[in-house]
Image (spheres, rainbow, N blue to C red):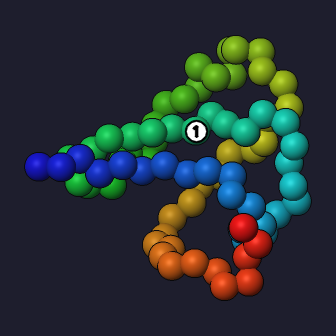
Amino acid sequence: MVPKRYTSMNSNYEQTESYCTGFFGPDTLVFTSGIAPSSSLDISFFEDLGLEGGCGAFSISGVKSGTIKHMQI
């Protein structure tokens, strides 16, 4: 069985909220057996690291494929 990889990045292709500068994270990389990862991952330890300038929590779901023709490369 091949594990699936779930990840996200700040690509800024389709920005739907005010831009937040500063620390972008924490990002999580979750390996599973093919089922969707738990929606209750505990990353609360980041609050104790004293990092400043973080963006609020968000989640991304859905499927995207192909390219956008008018994007500059």
Q: Estimate how packed mark 1 is, as few (under 14), some (14 to 19) or many (20 or more) residues with alpha carbons within 10 Å.
A: few
Left-right relation of 63 to 67 = left
* Image: 37 above or below 28: below
Callout 1 amino acid:
Asp
- Taking depth in this image into account, of 54 and 3 the one nearest to the observer is 3
Q: Secondary structure at mark 1?
A: loop
Residue at numbered disc 1: 27
Percent position (x, y) of residue 46?
64, 23
Q: Nearer the viewer, residue 45 or 4?
A: 4
Q: How many marks?
A: 1
Q: Give the residue drawn at x 58%, y 38%.
A: 27
Q: Residue at x 51, y 64 (%)?
A: 61
Please identify the residue farthest to the left as the structure is shown.
1
Q: Decide: is 43 above or below 60.
A: above
Residue at image point 64% right, 81% down: 68
Q: Position of residue 54 (x, y in %)?
A: 79, 35
**Left or right side of 42 for 20:** right
Q: Residue at x 84, y 25 (%)?
A: 52
Quarter-wise, where is residue 73 in the image? bottom right
